[in-house]
């Protein structure tokens, strides 16, 4: 294990559970959530007060110069440890491999291995247009046509049933593995068919609510933590609560207050000065952590990264240093960087990358948690 601070966390967690009646209880939107899922949620809530977990998309599946090697991750190649949070995507669930060619059978195995080692899994869903089969970036107006009662509702159900099957088979022995599920992300942008401009706010909310109710009530899946994640670049200001809450499905339908932010972390298209970007970055984080507190939920930076990792000190310069400037901005449970599909797009360092040195410092930092720091997070401290 990297740090001893985890022992303190477990102790704090126990205290939190014992004091729960005096505090606001940690509640998921699913009253039937499994014990492990409740324990994970309680852990996310508690650890986000003082620690930030590092996450990486497709980290076990491939990296720069390798594909599906056993027990490998570019992150592990650099620091000898896996990310705490492993991201996956279920786009093309009707095929054997997802939209990025990752085999679903392998994905199940990696999800299970991650859980066995004590790590956390999160799943997004780049769903094809269920009517014409084009990919997620299709610009057609679809949402109102796939809602209950609409002409193509069954097309949507065909996809959702496959998702439900996949999720129901995320198992370790007989135990369902808790999953942070993040459907219909970046919906305030106009690039996906479920995005702004291609459906109304009400239709998006209906699609979200229907999806949650279906998985929970009809499919009986009780191991999901539902994450909402608009995109920062389409919020007028980083601190606008109103912009953030565009098409928010409601407190009874969301567990995790997230957002994707590639915008305030050195993106070339952002013409603001570095100092102003950093200020915006902190403002955005404060917005989601405060909202999460207000709503008694958990906050996370569900996607970020610098494509191609252009700055050798990106992790300290654009993430750690700004985050540490204010107490409120620290209180996200995790941040997840996007996938290492090629050198131009890789968001995590890999062998030979000049950012490896800085990433090692980031790994050693007291604020960060990697997989080996997570112990017994799926066991409720009071044994219930
Ligand atoms: C996007 C891009 C796409 C990819 C999709 C799902 O952000 O990286 O190339 O297919 O995510 O991983």
Image (cartoon, rainbow, N blue to C red):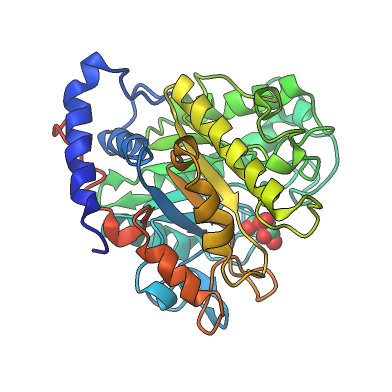
Q: Position of residue 338 (x, y in %)?
A: 59, 59
- How many dots with numbers? 0
Identify which residue is drawn at 57% across, 19% down: 250
Q: Is residue 81 visible?
A: yes
Residue 256 is left or right of residue 375, and the answer is right
Q: Nearer the viewer, residue 374 or 207?
A: 374
Residue 309 is left or right of residue 299, and the answer is right
Identify which residue is drawn at 61% across, 37% down: 284
Q: Nearer the viewer, residue 92 or 204?
A: 204
Identify which residue is drawn at 61% across, 58% down: 305
Residue 384 is left or right of residue 83, and the answer is left
Q: Nearer the viewer, residue 225 or 165?
A: 225
Q: Position of residue 63 (x, y in %)?
A: 54, 74
Which quadrant of the figure contains the N terminus?
bottom left
Identify which residue is drawn at 73% across, 30% down: 146
Q: Quadrant of ligand 1?
A: bottom right
Q: Position of residue 102 (x, y in %)?
A: 56, 66
Furthest toward the top, the residue is: 22
Q: Position of residue 126 (x, y in %)?
A: 65, 49
Which quadrant of the figure contains the C terminus?
top left
Residue 54 is left or right of residue 245, and the answer is left
Q: Is residue 254 visible?
A: no
């Amino acid at each position: 294990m990297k740090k001893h601070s985890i022992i303190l966390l477990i102790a704090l967690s126990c205290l939190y559970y014992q004091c729960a009646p005096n505090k606001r209880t940690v509640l998921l939107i699913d009253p039937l959530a499994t014990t492990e899922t409740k324990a994970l949620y309680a852990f996310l809530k508690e650890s986000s007060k003082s620690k930030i977990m590092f996450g990486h998309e497709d980290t076990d599946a491939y990296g720069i110069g390798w594909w599906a090697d056993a027990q490998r991750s570019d992150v592990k190649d650099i620091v000898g440890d896996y990310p705490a949070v492993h991201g996956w995507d279920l786009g093309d669930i009707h095929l054997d491999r997802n939209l990025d060619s990752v085999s679903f059978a392998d994905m199940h195995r990696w999800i299970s291995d991650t859980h066995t080692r004590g790590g956390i899994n999160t799943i997004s869903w780049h769903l094809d247009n269920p009517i014409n089969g084009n990919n997620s970036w299709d610009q057609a107006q679809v949402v109102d046509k796939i809602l209950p009662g609409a002409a193509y509702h069954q097309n949507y159900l065909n996809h959702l049933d496959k998702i439900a099957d996949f999720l129901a088979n995320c198992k370790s022995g007989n135990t369902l593995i808790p999953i942070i599920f993040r459907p219909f992300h970046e919906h305030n942008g106009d690039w996906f068919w479920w995005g702004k401009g291609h459906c109304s706010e009400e239709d998006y909310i209906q699609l979200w609510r229907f999806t949650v109710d279906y998985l929970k009530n009809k499919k009986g899946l009780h191991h999901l933590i539902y994450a909402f994640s608009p995109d920062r670049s389409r919020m007028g200001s980083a601190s606008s609560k109103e912009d953030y809450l565009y098409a928010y499905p409601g407190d009874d339908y969301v567990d995790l207050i997230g957002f994707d932010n590639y915008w305030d972390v050195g993106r070339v298209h952002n013409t603001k000065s570095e100092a102003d970007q950093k200020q915006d970055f902190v403002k955005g984080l404060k917005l989601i952590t405060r909202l999460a507190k207000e709503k008694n939920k958990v906050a996370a930076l569900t996607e970020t990264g610098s494509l191609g990792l252009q700055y050798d000190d990106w992790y300290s310069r654009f993430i750690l240093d700004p985050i540490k400037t204010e107490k409120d901005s620290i209180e996200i449970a995790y941040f997840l960087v996007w996938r290492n599909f090629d050198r131009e797009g890789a968001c995590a360092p890999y062998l030979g990358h000049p950012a490896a040195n800085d990433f090692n410092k980031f790994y050693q930092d007291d604020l960060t948690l990697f997989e080996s720091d997570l112990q017994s997070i799926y066991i409720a401290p009071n044994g219930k």
